[in-house]
Amino acid sequence: MRNIYLITLLLLLNSCDKAIDETTIVDLNKENSVSIFDIVDSISVIQLETKKESLLKSGYVLFHKNRFYVFDGSQQMAFCFDKNGKYLFRINKRGSGPDEYAYASNFKIDQFNDYLMFIGAGGSLVCYDLDGNFISKTRLPNETSSYNNIIALNKDTLLIYTWTREYKLGYYSKSKDKIFKWVFPTTIEFVQAFPPGKSYFYKDSLFFYNEELNNEIINMTDTTQRISYKYDFGENNYTKNQINSLLEFIRKNREEKKNVITRKEILGDNRYPHFFVNHCLETEYFKVLFLFYKKWGEHLYLFQEKGSGKNNLFRKTTEGVFFDRYNLSNTTVITKPNKNFAPLQKILNQDQLKIVSTHNPDNDNPFLVIYHLK
């Protein structure tokens, strides 16, 4: 119990001396009527080409330089398609060789060097160029047992996300082969409750959602961790008691060897935090949050207009659209619809609907519905 109160104190001390530019006020109970065309300029539909060598079982989608890169964790492969969905190549290099990767827990694109990065949980980093040619294989410093995510901040610096150290994030210099700064003290229980990883690029800076008492969005490219803005959810803001209760809940689960947090049970319980942020994004026009609020498995979407401060808050648009199997990529929401076809009839043109109607989910690769945000 002492550790729980200690981490709460550290959270408070960590954020008390950083200037905040602005506060974004949101009432999570005030959902409103939002059309998909209130938040998007246009919609694209892309069928990923189906070939024997390009069959996908699962995976998430990254878009970079007019290509779609899909990492299929179940097959441990990355597939590349052009902007029209034509299959180009795949990287299938799992192994222990000098140009191979062991089990990859994550896959990212280094946009500053144009590298494809396969990240092993134990600290291996294997890089290929955008055409799948091997570049380098690195063993990262043995300062943590788990490298859960890695994001490039510039040509030399990587930001490391870990769940098993006394800090959430670390700055790693490739040229010096050194983690030169750890930030945001934490505990294993805390990162299980709030896994670090909600971040986005905007105007060449990486912003990180620091899910603590103050709901801060922090500029991580600035190595002083300058707070850009924060969210104020009023009566739904986390309290110290709610956080401590959740940490105690997780600690008991660990003692009983229960590794899964049943958020379905705790989101509606006043003893625990009511919301859980899943993803965040920022565009010229919007600040965006995808979160779970009082219900697990059904997203609440916030698109706050920067100019007016208007909160577009909804679970489905007036057309019935929600973002299923999605990835956020700069100014787009890339989805792989599974059963949510009915709303598409209301928002797609005839050529796009033909892709949907001729798609065979049993044999074909997924098609992508891409929402281009204002």
Image: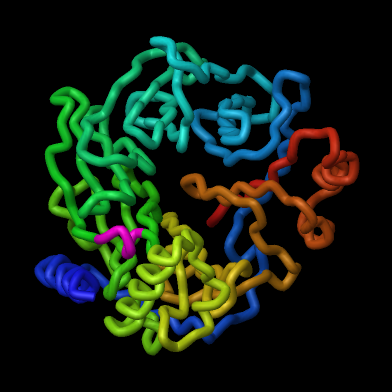
Quadrant location of the N terminus in the rendered image = bottom left
Residue in front for this viewpoint, 195 or 83? 195
Residue 122 against residue 350 in the figure, above or below: above
Q: Give whichever of 2, 235 is nearer the camera.
A: 2
Q: Is residue 149 above or below residue 315?
A: above
Q: Quadrant of residue 117?
A: top left
The answer to whether residue 343 shows anywhere in this view is: yes
Give the left or right position of residue 57, taking residue 186 as reference: right
In-front residue for pair 111/158: 158
- Which residue: 49% across, 76% down? 311
Image quadrant assignment for residue 24:
bottom left
Give the residue drawn at x 20%, y 69%.
3
Residue at the extreme left: 17
Q: Is residue 358 left or right of residue 193?
A: right
- The question of residue 138 being in magenta is answered with no
Q: Magenta segment range? A: 187-191
Could you tell me residue 82's position as x and y percent? 63, 25
Report x, y in % for residue 366.
74, 39
User: In percent of the image, x 40 and y 32: which residue is there?
Assistant: 120
Secondary structure of the magenta portion, mostly?
A: helix
Q: Is residue 175 left or right of residue 242?
A: left
Residue, x 43% and y 32% (percent of image)? Answer: 109
From the top left corner, tell me how far across and down residue 65 is, in percent. 50, 29
Describe residue 21's horizontal placement relative to residue 121 as left or right.
left
Q: Nearer the viewer, residue 228 or 327?
A: 327
Whether residue 19 is visible, yes or no, is: no
Q: In the rendered view, tell whether residue 221 sits above or below residue 194.
A: above
